[in-house]
Amino acid sequence: MQLIDGNKIAADIISELKAEVAEFSGRKPCLALVRVGEDPASVSYVRKKEKTAEEIGIDGKIILPPITISQQELESLIESLNADPSVDGILVQSPLPSPLDEKSAFKKISPDKDVDGFHPINIGKIAQEDESGFISCTPAGIMELLKRSNVNLKGKHVVVLGRSLIVGKPVALLALQKKAGANATVTICHSGTENLSTISKQADVLIAAIGKSEFVTRDMVKPGCVVIDVGINRVADPSKKTGFRLTGDVHFPSVSEIVSHITPVPGGVGPMTVAMLMKNTVKAYKMRTEKK
């Protein structure tokens, strides 16, 4: 069994981006990070993104509107960032506090600056295999993990557990694409799928993004399968100082005994999300500077 080390692969990507950015002349790439409220996880995520941007040489600009900001004011802020020539990428950190509407806010971000890849135009470009768009960071990270672990999807059966717009649907579209590293046959399963374990056991590559702790058990996986665990769940554990432990959507101890490759949680897909955000930001910068 080969453990797919997301920390190492993400560090490699960050190192490559750092070398690339060092060659740029003029201003540095700029990523605007909009965070509303003090949700502890959001604070931590934005800080991590800012720190990684700084390491690469990207200007991470954190914008902290008041928690009382209205939808109209938030969307006006996004419009001003769209119009700002010094900003290459815009990320609105989710979840937004109630009653703000995330989907509406994401749609206001210019597709050319949508480095999180959630705008309908960018999602549509995945289906069209148009590489001028931005791929949402977790699906992009999954494909990069597979590529750098020498897992070729050509002709393989990929089963995706989960149909979210953030992971399930885009990663299925990416695996389907008629290009090197893809060309898979893809099945999407979800909470309404009958005989799910019968389907999951047919997978050459199983991508678990269903949001349920240790949902995938050994009897659901074919021996020799490649397993990508996207889940990150907090499970109460009084023995831990934090009072909880992190688990994936896969029961790692049993499944890891029979697979060829598997990602751990933490340290698998998670680090790749930030690395791919930075890769998208550098891409946005290059696209905007080349237009001039």
Image (cartoon, rainbow, N blue to C red):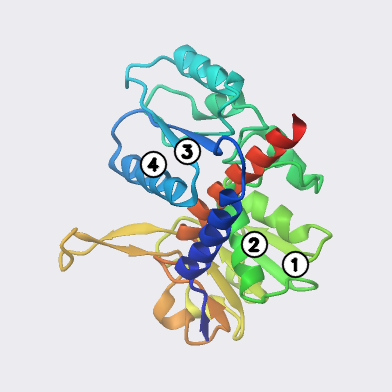
Work out whether mark 1 precedes mark 4 in sequence or the reverse, and give the earlier one: 4
Does the CB distance between marks 2 and 1 fall below 8 Å?
yes
Residue type indicated by callout 4: Val
What residue is rendered at 42% in x and 73% in y?
251
For the view shown, which residue lies furthest in the front direction? Answer: 25
**Residue carrying label 4:** 46
What residue is rendered at 76% in x and 64% in y?
182
Q: Is residue 176 above or below residue 204?
A: above
Q: Is residue 52 left or right of residue 286?
A: left
**Residue carrying label 3:** 59
How dense is the environment of label 1, judged by Cα within 10 Å: few (below 14), some, or many (20 and up)? some
**Residue carrying label 2:** 143
Q: Is residue 143 above or below residue 126?
A: below
Residue type indicated by callout 2: Met
Residue type indicated by callout 3: Asp
Q: Is residue 12 left or right of residue 65?
A: right
Question: Residue 80: x percent and y percent?
Answer: 54, 17
Q: Identify the image quadrant of the C terminus.
A: top right
For numbered disc 4, what is the local secondary structure? helix
| Distance (Cα) linking label 2 and label 4 | 23 Å
Judging depth in this view, the residue of 255 and 279 nearest the camera is 279
Question: Residue 50: x percent and y percent?
Answer: 41, 43
Work out whether mark 2 precedes mark 3 in sequence or the reverse, and give the earlier one: 3
| Distance (Cα) linking label 4 and label 3 | 13 Å
**Residue carrying label 1:** 181
Question: Residue 61: x percent and y percent?
Answer: 43, 33
Looking at the rendered image, the disc whose residue lies closer to the viewer, 2 or 3, is 3
